[in-house]
Amino acid sequence: MSPPCDGTLDLATLASYWLGELPASDSDQLEEHLFACEGCSRRLRALVSLGDGVRRLARRGAVQVVVTPSFLEAALRAGLRVREYTVPPGGRVACTVTAQDDLLVGRMRADFSGVSRLDVLVEMAGQAPGRIEDVPVRPEAGELILAQAMPAARALGRAVLRYRLVARGDGRERVLGEYTFDHTPTPS
Ligand SMILES: [Zn+2]
């Protein structure tokens, strides 16, 4: 019988362990925990099997990454704890992130038919606007899935993030939808 896990062992720590970046004493302690905790060892295996995408999201540096539906499915199947918010065009959602979440995902619904090139624009008060250019999307996808890097998401205070999906072509831009994420840090 494994002792119940309080879930505070986050994916970033597991990623550091996997990459051999933890001090030996921490690493020993973590190994002891993994030995006893089925939940965390399953998450470590998921981290390994999902490869680069999930490692990037678990670590500092990246802010957000566009992921495929199959990546999300694999993450869920592997037992990662995914918090997701689905937002229709023009929609607004109240969101948060907790210490127990492995991934934080926004699913922005849109009609991508006829779209050959797509950019994602992001705005947040007090920050320079960002733009992710030339995002891969299939016409029949019906949604764009954006995963937040967890260290950045956890560091976020009260904030309103506004995303816009913009189709580009022939020198013109067409807004497919605007999506508002009204973020509140988790009450601790
Ligand atoms: Zn555990």
Image: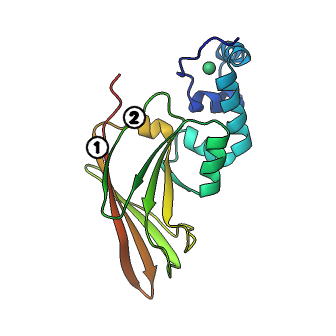
Q: Is residue 20 above or below residue 71?
A: above
Mark 2: which secondary structure? helix
Q: Is residue 96 above or below residue 10?
A: below
Residue 186 appears in view: yes
Q: Where, quadrant-wise, is the N terminus in this rendering?
A: top right
Q: Residues within 10 Å of mark 2 (few under 14, many from 20)?
A: few
Ligand 1 quarter of the rendering: top right
Total numbered labels: 2
Picture disc at residue 177: none
The residue lying at 43 percent from left, 59 percent from top is 108
The residue lying at 65 percent from left, 25 percent from top is 40
Amino acid type at circle 1 is Ala
**Which residue has dot 2 on it?**
155
Distance from the alpha carbon under mark 2 to that under mark 1: 11 Å
Q: Is residue 127 above or below residue 166?
A: above
Mark 2–mark 1 contact, CB under 8 Å? no
Amino acid type at circle 2 is Ala
Q: Where, quadrant-wise, is the C terminus in this rendering?
A: top left
Locate residue 177, reporting x and y percent: 35, 68
Q: Nearer the viewer, residue 14 or 46?
A: 46
**Which residue has dot 1 on it?**
159
Question: Furthest-front residue in view?
Answer: 1
Q: Is residue 96 above or below residue 9?
A: below
Mark 1: which secondary structure? strand
Locate residue 8, reporting x and y percent: 52, 21
Locate residue 124, reporting x and y percent: 30, 52
Residue 128 appears in view: no
